[in-house]
Image (cartoon, grey):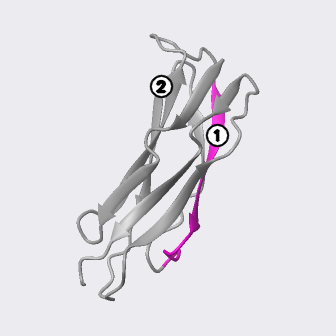
Amino acid sequence: DAVIGLERTLYSIQEGSAPAVEVCIVVYRPTGICPIPFPFSVMFSTSDLTAVVDNDYLDADTIQLFGACATKRCISVPIVDDSTEEPDEQVSISLGDPSDSRITASPRQGLINITDTSE
């Protein structure tokens, strides 16, 4: 069976250190030169946990299209650098069901941890 998933389940960024976090979706199985020989898509979503969209990060919901033989797709999740002192904040990231039933997604849930630099 073909398996895709988040490359990592925890991404961390210090607010102000970079404009975005790069989150990647990778093909885990099968391996080889052309692991999945057909195109497919998967929904990538962000949602509030303790971080708030537009205040702490920008919405990065998107359908990711993988071409035949693709092994990795990365999404930039923009981080808002504000001057408010606040504790660390978290954004939930997740994958939906792949467009082809021959593919499963795992791991499909993760977190972005935003560390505040103004504390």
Task: Please state if 27 lies on the left or on the right of 99 as rendered.
Answer: left
Q: Which mark is residue 94?
A: none
Residue drawn at (45%, 10%), measured in percent from left and top?
33
* Mark 1, secondary structure of its residue: strand
**Mark 1 = which residue?**
42
Q: Is residue 29 visible?
A: yes
Asked if the residue under mark 1 is in contact with the one under mark 2, i.e. CB atoms within 8 Å, the reply is: no
Q: Residue at x 37, y 68 (%)?
A: 114
Spot occupied by residue 64 in the image (x, y as percentages of width and height): 58, 42
Q: Quarter of the image holding residue 67?
A: top right
**Crowd tier of the residue under label 2, counting other residues whose Cα lies within 10 Å: few below 14, some 14–19, many 20 or above:** many
| Residue 11 as seen in the image, left or right of residue 15 | right
Q: CA distance from mark 2 to mark 1?
A: 13 Å
Q: How many marks?
A: 2
Question: Residues in magenta?
Answer: 39-54
Q: What label does residue 71 carry, if any?
A: 2
Disc on the earlier residue, 2 or 1: 1
Q: Position of residue 1 (x, y in %)?
A: 66, 17
Name the image quarter holding the C terminus.
bottom left
Type of amino acid at the residue the image marks with label 1: Val
Location of residue 74 (image quadrant): top left
Q: Position of residue 81 (x, y in %)?
A: 32, 76
- Residue located at (26% from left, 71% from top): 16
Q: Residue furthest bottom?
A: 84
Q: Amino acid at mark 2?
A: Thr
Q: Position of residue 92 (x, y in %)?
A: 54, 61
